[in-house]
Image: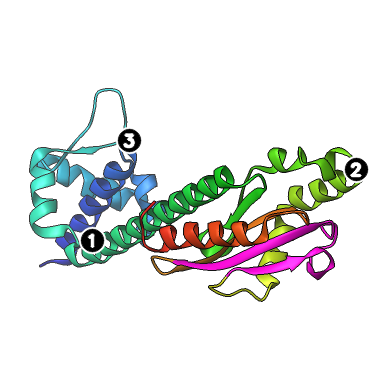
Amino acid sequence: MHIHDDRKNQVLNAIIEHFIKTAEPVGSKTIILTYNFKVSPATVRNDMAALEDEGMIMQPHTSAGRVPTDKGYRFYVDELADYDEAKVLARKTIHSLREKARADLARERVHEAVQLLSQATPNMAFATIPENTRTFFMGFSKMLRQPEFIHSPLQASQVMEVIEDSDHFLKGIQNLETSEEPRIFIGEENILQGIDSCSLIVSRYHYDGYEGAIGILGPKRMPYAYNSAILREVRDLLENNQL
């Protein structure tokens, strides 16, 4: 293949790939700036004129740029398209989409677990979501209707501050020594400052390769055995994909 033909094919390839991305007619300046051609604009314009004479590209009436013709697309598909590079990109795209869908599904299941846990107890339910980037909370306002918080607005305010600082709460939960079995932290046993008026029951969960914590927060006056049992049941439903 002559150097001129090789460069002309590169110009055609650049025109088609740029048009595929932008849906805009392509000019010589765009080709040089975007695709780093080491030739003059006049040389690229000459190649584009030759490609137009060959029926590979055409000039729309409303633009100075060029767009591919059916013949140009056919030559691109048969001779120019980089199928090996496209295969790598396709695999990366599918892998990324599958991982996102997997993470989205895991978050949805964890959210359902927290919702169920909140419905089963008068306290607040929470869980760190997959990859431990956020925390789901449910039942906080219900917990604040407990007598302890109604009679002590200061305690309610302190707990509210801790919950509203979600990053601080998340880090505190991550630093707890948790296990599969629910662990109970009573009052001052909590490492989170501001919730020493509360008790915390936390369990570690695993779902589809993800790991997080799920638990219950409420006043120290809580049904510990029942809350532990409820937490264990919901965690098992989550881990066994039965929600």
Q: Is residue 153 left or right of residue 129?
A: right
Camera-nearest label, 3 or 2: 2
* Residue 43 visible from this viewpoint: yes
Residue named by callout 1? 86
Residue named by callout 2? 152
- Residue 42: image tag: none
Mark 1 or mark 2: name the one nearer the start of the chain. 1
Q: Is residue 209 left or right of residue 154?
A: left
Residue named by callout 3? 24
Mark 3 or mark 2: name the one nearer the start of the chain. 3
What segment is highlighted magenta in the picture?
182-206
- Bin the neighbour count of mark 2 within 10 Å (Cα to Cα): few under 14, some 14-19, many 20 and up: few
- Bin the neighbour count of mark 1 within 10 Å (Cα to Cα): few under 14, some 14-19, many 20 and up: few
The amino acid type of the residue labelled 3 equals Glu
Camera-nearest label, 1 or 2: 2
User: What is the C-alpha distance between the residues marked 3 and 2?
Assistant: 66 Å
- Bin the neighbour count of mark 3 within 10 Å (Cα to Cα): few under 14, some 14-19, many 20 and up: some
Q: Of 178 and 220, which appears nearest the observer?
A: 220
Q: Of 56 and 184, which appears nearest the observer?
A: 184
Disc 3 to disc 2: CB gap under 8 Å = no
> Where is residue 27, by image quadrant?
top left
User: What is the C-alpha distance between the residues marked 1 and 2?
Assistant: 64 Å
User: What is the C-alpha distance between the residues marked 1 and 3?
Assistant: 22 Å
Q: Of 175 and 40, which appears nearest the observer?
A: 175
Mark 1 or mark 3: name the one nearer the start of the chain. 3
Q: Position of residue 124 (x, y in %)?
A: 66, 48
Picture layout, residue 128 above or below residue 69: below
Q: Position of residue 2 (x, y in %)?
A: 13, 66
Picture layout, residue 23 above or below residue 113: above
> Where is residue 144, by image quadrant?
top right
Q: Residue at x 18, y 61 (%)?
A: 4
